[in-house]
């Protein structure tokens, strides 16, 4: 799998860049205090008592983890309040430094961390002591004293937190520093509470020192309460993380990104360095071994979990937990030492009583962090949710596989083949054709009737195997249904496709032996190629079916499609009644193809295109049903449906700062209708869409037919404010200068010239001439069929303004258009423009 670069992370040694200045600040402030303070070291018994309280106050802690580092909130502020009041400022610095040294030695930290913590405590205390020395002397224990002590302790706390943020930002990066602030901020409330408690202790102690015994009991209770609060805080955080984890798993299961959504969150929830998901190979699913590692944003295909622990958890079906706080026998602890692992928990994933994999965490984060027994139930709960999500994900994957594959042969079905053909014909490669070979198995019905459907299924499976084994590796082999198989691939020419069809047919004709039964199976093969025989999957599959039917009467059993095999007029007659019903029941859909400025790649509008999914014939090309509508008097209704949908979508466009301009195709016959401009004006008013947002595209042949019949309608439309465009310009035989007579605003260069620009100098010259002359006439030029970056660059070089084609987007339903716009738009628009910039995508 592709591995992403981990974020920049520096060594802990970079902490010395902060430790050094902190130590210098501490020394300077301490020396200054020694100079200006008299009687620095009085009240030694009281200092020893406060020293003990400070060391004790470090024991009850609330810990939190930032990246690989652990931090703690303690009760240090309580004895610090007493120290600032009872001791001299310099003595407070000495006592706090001594307590910090003892505490950090007990924690057994690394040298860099040890020195930073000590220097940080010394610097924070010395700065707070300097502040205390600069403020007016404290008298009594009234509100003035409260404010002074609160200011000193707050300064101490803020200095500690600021230094931690700086060092974490330096070592781990800015994001880690922000996590420190976010995580530690709620604990500032605890600091304030500790200061208040310290003040209360001070006030009571001033009246009688016997209160110390009462406060001793209170302190013991406070420790219990503090520990309960810390435990509640951890449980609350764990519950929130668990909720986020389960929600992410439920949302990511259907789209196949379960591991990506789960492992990083599991690692963060368990505060582990590694979190691993292992699934053994099962059926068509290969083995999965993915790991989320601290400081790495991607998933790795390696793991730190000892294989012995994983195998033991799988064999025994039990959780394996090993570590200094988790126990474990000496043998498993030795395994950890051999793999240089601190601790690990491995939980089996179950589907009923069957173990389908394991989920694992290794190495608790933090110098003093270890997995404890209370972590095991939490991790087992995570594993239970993960197992359910995994089973659901595999179920969805199975359903998705079944939706695109044949159940008998396991080959791609019609839906999958149609999608592959659509992709193949979209990317046109010079010097190659997309060949579609359809194999119709003869006499399969007789096999089913004589030997049963089980025998027929065996024949189908054997045909599928032979085609899959003998077809070129680049070919897609599928089953359309019934006794029809298809092979599609790119080939050099038609002759190569016919040769391959003959070879595969001979392979299938070999005897098929099923036990004691031997069958001779023959096939008829139809052949079509793109672009000669069609430009869309539906047309290619329809025509290859016709060719296969004709091949049954051909001596060689292989037939290339010919227009003679198809009577388009008969098909159109059959579509006429269906089209009328489709228009009456709103069965046609309107798709939208974006138009984009070539210089800045900004969305400037969309072309509205009618699409018809026929219940029998599948997708019917507009080249088929538009002529049917025109010849049967249904064109007006079809145009109105497209126009209404376009205006409605333009009105409802979600981005008011970037209105959606629409283009609708008009037939030449519509231009002869004198009532058409009035209907357009009525619709514009009904949908409250400004006229300038609407563009009508009329083919060149319909505008330049040698007569003036379209002119009145065109002028009325122009007077309304509608924009007019000459579509497919260049395919007719008119003069470019004739454009001056037309009341049009835009010229669309036919895609046949645009797509040939990169290889044919003649096409390039034609496009250049159209662009140059159109711009001289003040017309906008739109290039149709932009499908490559090279074509885009050539168009920009000759000054073309707007483009439309698969390089930017294919026609999309409105819902996908809105999504496409949001995905393609940059997070911030370019300055001084109202239209978002888009990037070209294939």
Image (cartoon, rainbow, N blue to C red):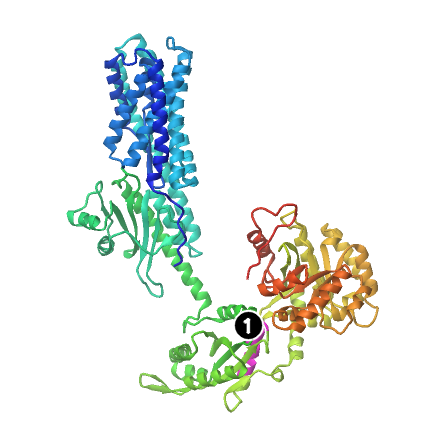
Quadrant containing the N terminus is: bottom left
At a point 68% along the width and 60% down the height, the residue shown is 799
Number of on-image labels: 1
Choose top left, top right, bottom left or bottom right for residue 520.
Answer: bottom left
Quadrant containing the C terminus is: bottom right
Please indicate, yes or no, whether residue 71 appears anywhere in the rendered image. Answer: yes
Between residues 243 and 202, which one lies in front from this camera angle? Answer: 202
Q: Residue 167 placed where, x, y %?
A: 38, 35
Instruction: Decide whether residue 39 is among the magenta residues.
Output: no
- Give the extent of the magenta segment: 535-548
Instruction: Decide whether residue 542 is among the magenta residues.
Output: yes
Pointer 1 residue: 429
Between residues 373 and 22, which one lies in front from this camera angle? Answer: 22
Q: In the rendered view, tell whether residue 583 sits above or below residue 353.
A: below
Would residue 173 appear left or right of 809 to someone viewing this image? left
Would residue 294 appear left or right of 436 to someone viewing this image? left
Please indicate, yes or no, whether residue 585 appears anywhere in the rendered image. Answer: no
Q: In the rendered view, tell whether residue 755 sits above or below residue 219.
A: below
At a point 19% along the width and 43% down the height, the residue shown is 327
Choose top left, top right, bottom left or bottom right for residue 89.
Answer: top left
Choose top left, top right, bottom left or bottom right for residue 300.
Answer: bottom left
Between residues 265 and 6, which one lies in front from this camera angle? Answer: 6
Q: Residue 613 placed where, x, y %?
A: 59, 67
Q: Residue 189 placed where, x, y %?
A: 40, 26
Packing grade of label 1 (10 A; few <14, some 14-19, many >=20) is: few
């Amino acid at each position: 799998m592709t591995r992403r670069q981990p974020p920049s992370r520096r060594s802990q040694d970079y902490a010395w860049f902060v430790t050094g200045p902190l130590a210098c600040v501490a020394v300077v402030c301490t020396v200054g205090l020694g100079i200006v303070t008299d009687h620095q070291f009085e009240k030694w018994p009281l200092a020893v008592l406060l020293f003990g309280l400070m060391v004790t106050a470090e024991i009850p802690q609330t810990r939190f983890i930032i990246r690989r580092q652990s931090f703690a909130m303690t009760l240090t502020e309580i004895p610090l309040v007493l120290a600032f009041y009872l001791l001299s400022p310099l003595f407070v610095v000495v006592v706090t430094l001594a307590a910090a040294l003892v505490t950090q030695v007990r924690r057994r930290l690394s040298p860099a961390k040890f020195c930073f913590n000590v220097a940080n405590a010394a610097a924070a205390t010395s700065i707070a002591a300097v502040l205390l020395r600069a403020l007016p002397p404290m008298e009594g224990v009234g509100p003035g004293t409260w404010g002074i002590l609160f200011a000193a302790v707050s300064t101490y706390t803020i200095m500690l937190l600021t230094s931690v943020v700086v060092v974490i930002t330096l070592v781990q990066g800015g994001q880690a520093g922000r996590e420190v602030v976010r995580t530690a901020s709620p604990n500032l409330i605890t600091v304030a509470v500790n200061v208040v408690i310290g003040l209360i202790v001070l006030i009571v102690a001033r009246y009688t020192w016997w209160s110390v015994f009462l406060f001793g009991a209170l302190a013991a209770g406070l420790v219990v309460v503090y520990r309960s609060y810390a435990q509640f805080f951890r449980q609350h955080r764990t519950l929130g993380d668990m909720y986020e984890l389960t929600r992410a798993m439920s949302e990511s299961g259907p789209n196949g990104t379960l591991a990506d959504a789960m492992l990083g969150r599991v690692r963060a929830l368990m505060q582990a360095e590694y979190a691993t998901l292992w699934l053994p190979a099962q059926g068509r699913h290969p083995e999965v071994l993915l790991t989320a590692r601290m400081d790495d944003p991607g998933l790795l295909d390696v793991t730190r979990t000892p294989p012995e622990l994983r195998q033991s958890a799988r064999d025994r079906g039990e959780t394996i937990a090993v570590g200094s706080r988790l126990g474990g026998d000496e043998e498993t602890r030795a395994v950890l030492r051999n793999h240089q692992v601190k601790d690990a928990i491995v939980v089996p994933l179950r589907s009923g009583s069957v173990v389908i994999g394991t989920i694992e965490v290794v190495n608790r984060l933090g110098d003093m962090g270890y997995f404890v027994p209370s972590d095991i139930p939490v991790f087992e709960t995570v594993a239970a949710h993960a197992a359910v999500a995994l089973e659901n994900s595999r179920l969805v994957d199975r359903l998705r596989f079944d939706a695109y594959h044949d159940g008998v042969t396991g080959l791609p079905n019609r839906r999958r083949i149609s999608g592959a053909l659509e992709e193949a014909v979209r990317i046109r490669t010079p010097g190659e054709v997309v060949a579609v070979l359809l194999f119709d198995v003869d006499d399969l019905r007789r096999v089913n009737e004589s030997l049963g459907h089980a025998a027929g299924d065996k024949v189908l499976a054997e045909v599928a195997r032979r085609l899959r084994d003998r077809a070129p590796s680049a070919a897609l082999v599928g089953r359309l249904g019934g006794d029809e198989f298809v092979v599609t691939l790119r080939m050099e020419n038609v002759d190569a496709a016919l040769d391959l069809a003959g070879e595969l047919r001979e392979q299938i004709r070999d005897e098929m032996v099923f036990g004691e039964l031997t069958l001779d199976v023959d096939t008829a093969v139809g052949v079509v190629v793109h672009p000669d025989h069609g430009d869309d999957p539906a047309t290619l599959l329809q025509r290859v079916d016709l060719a296969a039917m004709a091949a049954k009467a051909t001596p060689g059993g292989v037939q290339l499609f010919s227009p003679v095999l198809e009577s388009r007029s008969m098909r159109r007659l059959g579509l006429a009644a269906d089209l009328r019903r489709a228009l009456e029941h709103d069965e046609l859909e309107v798709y939208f193809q974006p138009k984009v400025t070539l210089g800045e790649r900004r969305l400037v509008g969309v072309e509205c295109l009618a699409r018809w999914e026929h219940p029998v014939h599948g997708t019917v090309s507009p080249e088929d049903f538009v002529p049917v509508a025109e010849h049967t008097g249904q064109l007006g209704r079809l145009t109105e449906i497209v126009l209404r949908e376009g205006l409605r979508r333009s009105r409802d466009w979600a981005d008011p700062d970037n209105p959606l301009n629409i283009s609708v195709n008009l037939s030449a016959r519509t231009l002869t209708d004198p009532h058409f401009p009035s209907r357009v004006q009525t619709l514009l008013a009904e949908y409250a869409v400004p006229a300038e947002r609407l563009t009508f595209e009329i083919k060149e042949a319909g505008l330049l037919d040698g007569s003036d019949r379209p002119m009145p309608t065109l002028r009325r439309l122009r007077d309304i404010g509608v924009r007019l465009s000459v579509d497919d310009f260049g395919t007719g035989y008119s003069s470019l200068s004739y454009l001056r007579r037309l009341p049009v605003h835009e010229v669309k260069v036919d895609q046949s010239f645009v797509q040939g620009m990169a290889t044919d100098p003649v096409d390039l010259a034609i496009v250049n001439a159209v662009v140059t002359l159109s711009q001289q006439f003040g017309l906008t030029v739109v290039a149709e069929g932009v499908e490559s970056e090279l074509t885009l660059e050539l168009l920009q070089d000759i000054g073309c303004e707007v483009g439309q084609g698969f390089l930017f987007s294919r026609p999309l339903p409105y819902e996908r258009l809105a999504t496409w716009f949001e995905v393609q738009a940059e997070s911030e628009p370019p300055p001084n423009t109202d239209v978002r910039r888009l990037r070209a995508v294939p």
